[in-house]
Image (cartoon, rainbow, N blue to C red):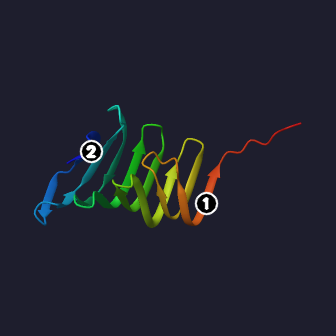
Amino acid sequence: VVLTDRGINKGELLSDTTLTYEDGTRLVLYPVNLQFYTSTGAKDGVMTAKWGTYNQRLQRLEVRGNVVVVREDGKRLSTPQLVYDQQRNQFFTDSTFTLNEPKRTVTGIGFETDPKLSNFRCFKTCKFTGAVQVPTK
């Protein structure tokens, strides 16, 4: 499945096995591999999971089982369950997660963010760890 936004290719959704329901508008995928692209067509990241459901009417992908998002800028998100809402251009979950960035790690329960993982909002038990530089006199 090619995910587009106003005619621009935003991603390619691939799987080994696909089951179709509701006149082909709901797909169940085993396993899930979603490649993200920038508006210029450059690879922007990849999402993998054991399985997922894509609703073409809602333009919503819900994936489960060892969900991992790896971005080209080095960020890595892992969670047991994740929703990608194409209309809102947003990831969200109410599950536990770990976000590894080059200079910090974020853990918690539940979040929402853009696909670049840059406008990140954590909901519960949020913990940020990373190196801190203490200024010297």
Residue under the image location 60 percent in, 43 percent down: 103
Judge whether 47 appears above or below 50 on screen. above
Q: Which one is nearer the viewer's eye here, 57 or 115?
A: 57
Which residue is identified by label 2? 4
Report the disc number at residue 77.
none
Quarter of the image containing the C terminus? top right
The x and y percentages for residue 31 are: 24, 55
Residue 7 in which image quadrant: top left
Question: Dot 1: what SS?
Answer: strand
> What amino acid does circle 1 point to?
Lys
Which residue is identified by label 1? 127
> What amino acid does circle 2 point to?
Thr
Q: Residues under labels 1 and 2: Cα distance?
A: 35 Å
Question: Dot 2: what SS?
Answer: strand
Q: Which one is nearer the viewer's eye here, 16 or 85?
A: 85
The x and y percentages for residue 76 are: 46, 47
Horizontal side of residue 84 vs 104, given as left or right: left
